[in-house]
Amino acid sequence: MKENVIDVLLYLFENYIDNDDVSQPDKAALESELEQVGFPELEIDKALVWLENMTVIAEDSAGSPLLAMRFYAEQELKLLNTACRGYLLFLEQVGVLDQMTREVVIERVLALETDEIDLDQLKWVVLMVLFYQPGREVAYAWMEDLVFEDMEAVIH
């Protein structure tokens, strides 16, 4: 099975990031564990850089106003299909995403350097972005419920 950056990110998010355990492993231990789980070294490195850049973006994006209308660039249109773009619009309309957070989500999707992203993967990216955005705890909790309700619906 070909593992990619989003698979590594999901593993990290489920096992470390959204976890009440305050003892987090150091970077070397984490890389070692991810390699033992079976993730390729290149994908591990990309995922860790992706997360490091997430914190920088969260700090830089506070309070920056944007225009109300969003036009997608050609590269974004190729990567985000109609369902993904519609879901981003839905999340914005119900208040889960604001304009700035939407832009962070789109930037983080592009940073995955993948050819395509499906709706489930997009939901996880949104969840990770909200986790790192200061003042977005309510939106994060709402999105977390959406993601895990969808997972339960698939399981049952």
Image (cartoon, grey):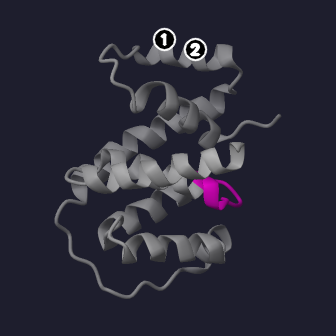
- Give 54 or 15, whichever is nearer the viewer: 15
> x, y percentage for residue 26?
39, 14
Q: Which residues are magenta?
A: 112-121
Quadrant in which residue 79 is drawn: bottom right
Locate the C terminus and report the quarter of the image it occupies.
Answer: top right
Residue for point 58% across, 30% down: 44
From where the camera sits, is residue 111 visible? no
Query: Which residue is disc 2 drawn over?
Result: 33
Q: Percent from the top left, x then y, of residue 97?
A: 35, 66
Q: Amino acid at mark 2?
A: Glu
The x, y position of residue 91, in whole percent, is 43, 69
Q: Nearer the viewer, residue 9 or 96?
A: 96
- Relative side of 87 to 59, left or right: right
What is the number of the mark on residue 29?
A: 1
- Element marked by disc 2: helix
**Residue in view at x 38 percent, y 38 percent:** 52
* Type of amino acid at the residue the image marks with label 1: Ala
Q: CA distance from mark 1 to mark 2?
A: 6 Å
95 is higher (above) or lower (below) than 109: below
Q: Are marks 1 and 2 in contact (CB under 8 Å)?
A: yes
